Image (cartoon, rainbow, N blue to C red):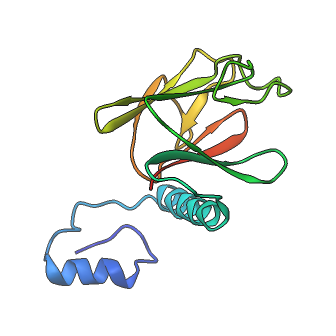
Amino acid sequence: MSLERADADPLENNIESLLPGALDTVRFDNSKIDTLLSNLRFVAELLSEAPISFTGPALIFRARDNAVRAVPIGASLRFGRSQDNDISFPDLREVSRHHFTITAHEEEFVLADGNSANGTFVRGNRIQTHHLCDGDVFEAAGILFAFIRF
């Protein structure tokens, strides 16, 4: 076995002992691992501060006033500068009028950019649509959001 990551951790060694050869073709990208760990820490921090009084899927974020907000997602949720959005930031010029939406499709939730000027990003990549997974972190107009199923 030859891992290409110099600082392999004990978990990797345990995987190799349980499943010999399982990691032979795995190439570890330190930047992706670091991003994942950063996202996990971000979600854990938000959850520790979130005012959670409901169950079900929600969008959690730290507002510009530094308060953590948790907004439940029903059939859909829309974010933008316009007052007709579920989450509105009317004073932020970086936010488009209808920046992004999250729409429920049975058990799946789809994040869709609303052709915003500044984009919606998942793991640093600008997206048009993205199927959300529990714990996904994404960015719009400099604000980090986490998708959580309570």
Relative to 53, residue 103 above or below: above
Foreground residue, 106 or 35? Answer: 106
Foreground residue, 86 or 43? Answer: 86
Q: Locate residue 42 relative to residue 15 in the image: left or right.
A: right
Task: Locate the N terminus and report the quarter of the image it occupies.
Answer: bottom left
Relative to 78, residue 18 above or below: below
Foreground residue, 15 or 79? Answer: 79
Residue 63 drawn at (x, y percent): 76, 46
Name the image quarter holding residue 44.
Answer: bottom right
| Count of numbered tags | 0
Residue 126 drawn at (x, y percent): 55, 29
Relative to 41, residue 85 above or below: above
Residue 124 drawn at (x, y percent): 56, 40
Q: Locate residue 6 relative to residue 80 in the image: left or right.
A: left
The residue that appears at 14% across and 76% down in the rendered structure is 19
Residue 10 drawn at (x, y percent): 36, 85
The residue that appears at 21% across and 78% down in the rendered structure is 16
Q: Residue furthest front?
A: 53
Foreground residue, 41 or 37? Answer: 41
Q: Locate residue 95 relative to residue 119 in the image: left or right.
A: right
Name the image quarter holding residue 150.
Answer: bottom left
